[in-house]
Amino acid sequence: MNAKPTILVVDDIPDNIDLLCAVLEDDYRTKIAVNGERALKIANGESKPDLILLDVMMPGMSGYEVCKELKANPATRDIPVIFVTAMSETVDEQLGLGLGAADYITKPISAPIVLARIKTQLSMKRVHDFLRDQNNFLETEIEKRTREIVALQDVTIHTMASLAETRDSETGNHIRRTAHYVKTLAEKLRTNPRFSDFLTDKNIELLFKSAPLHDIGKVGIPDRILLKPGRFEGNEFEIMKTHTTLGRNAIRQAERELGLEVDFLKFAKEIAYGHQEKWDGSGYPEGLSGDDIPISARLMAVADVYDALISRRVYKEGMSHEAAVAIIAEGRGQHFDPDMVDAFMELQQDFIDIAKRYADSDHDMTQHREKIERFSG
């Protein structure tokens, strides 16, 4: 059996309280407050009333003041308030309704009118509560689905990046470092007028997630070339250069199989395909120059070259940070976007910290050396 709705009767005159309680007793439970302070305490309690009948003229806080506080408090603003008062002027009613009251009844009261007005407001409150609960449910579901989509994106990128890592064990920490370099560089450049429209919070997060896929195309490079511990000969470098196209095409193929273009992979395609382009047009695969190179690819170019220079490999020692910085600076306006180099120069300590945090271990190097020996033996 459903419990009766609870009505809070607020009035300082006992006879008025007795009269209202008598009108309500068959259909409702009642609570009583003889002043505004007590009414606010009850309304803010654990068991809130479903509706409040509120007198205007009371000692201490007036009914108008009580209503104003009720409507200002998120915990009580949805409780319908009906003024029940001897103040019958139109201006008084306008003031009460303007403060957020649901209705305004003048004394002397008519029992049928009071009951009808209460029934109407409680019916409206039930509809309001239902819609509010539905909206909260829908918002919760949307948040849940959004988290699931983001998780799916992360898993997709992680799986594809891990695929590249299985071909070249040097790739693991390299892709982690370069992702953080790209994010750090992007955050620095977001106030630059050339990049501010593009480098939004959303796009920077997508760049960070997409960066690990820059070398995904290397899964298509033969092991005799990919794992070669020395300089390329003959057409080996030309074959190695195809990793940019292979990477973009692999992502495109994944999209085709899904039957749609996926927004979060847009930057992944740009980075995979364009990170070997150079500012002066001497890069590959298309020989793009300047602003024709996607911003995402230009960011990765700085990150990728810096990490390649400082990284220790089985066939070379890593350069010092200072030597790598000198090469990056020399490539300003030739290999790299000048503004990105300027930002990089200001972020040197950040790059050093990232390189230390995700440094290659001796175990990683030993595994890679053994892998090369297996394929070259």
Image (cartoon, helix red, strand yellow):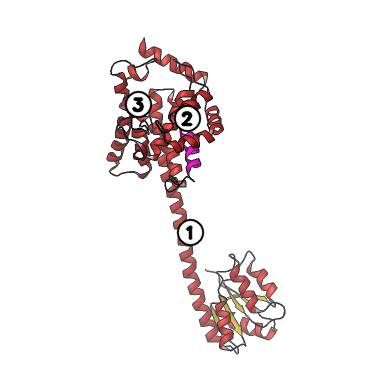
Other-residue count near label 1 (Cα within 10 Å), few / some / many at <14 / 14–19 / ≥20: few
Q: Marks 3 and 1, Cα distance to the nearest angstrom?
A: 47 Å
Tell me which corner region of the image, top left, top right, bottom left or bottom right, holds residue 148: top left
Residue under pointer 1? 136
Residue under pointer 3? 218
**Residue at horizontal 36 percent and vertical 12 percent from the top:** 376
Give SS at disc 3. helix
Q: Earlier in the sequence, mark 3 or mark 1?
A: 1
Give SS at disc 1. helix
Which region of the structure is painted magenta? 175-189
Residue 67 relative to residue 250: left or right = right
Image x and y of residue 294, in percent: 36, 39
Q: Amino acid at mark 2?
A: Ala
Does the magenta run of residues contain 179? yes
Q: Amino acid at mark 1?
A: Asn
Majority secondary structure in the magenta region: helix
Residue under pointer 2? 329
Q: Earlier in the sequence, mark 3 or mark 2?
A: 3
Residue 299 relative to residue 34: left or right = left
Q: Which mark is residue 301?
A: none
**Residue at horizontal 47 percent and vertical 46 percent from the top:** 201
Image x and y of residue 215, in percent: 38, 29
Look at the image and tell me whether residue 332 can be seen: yes
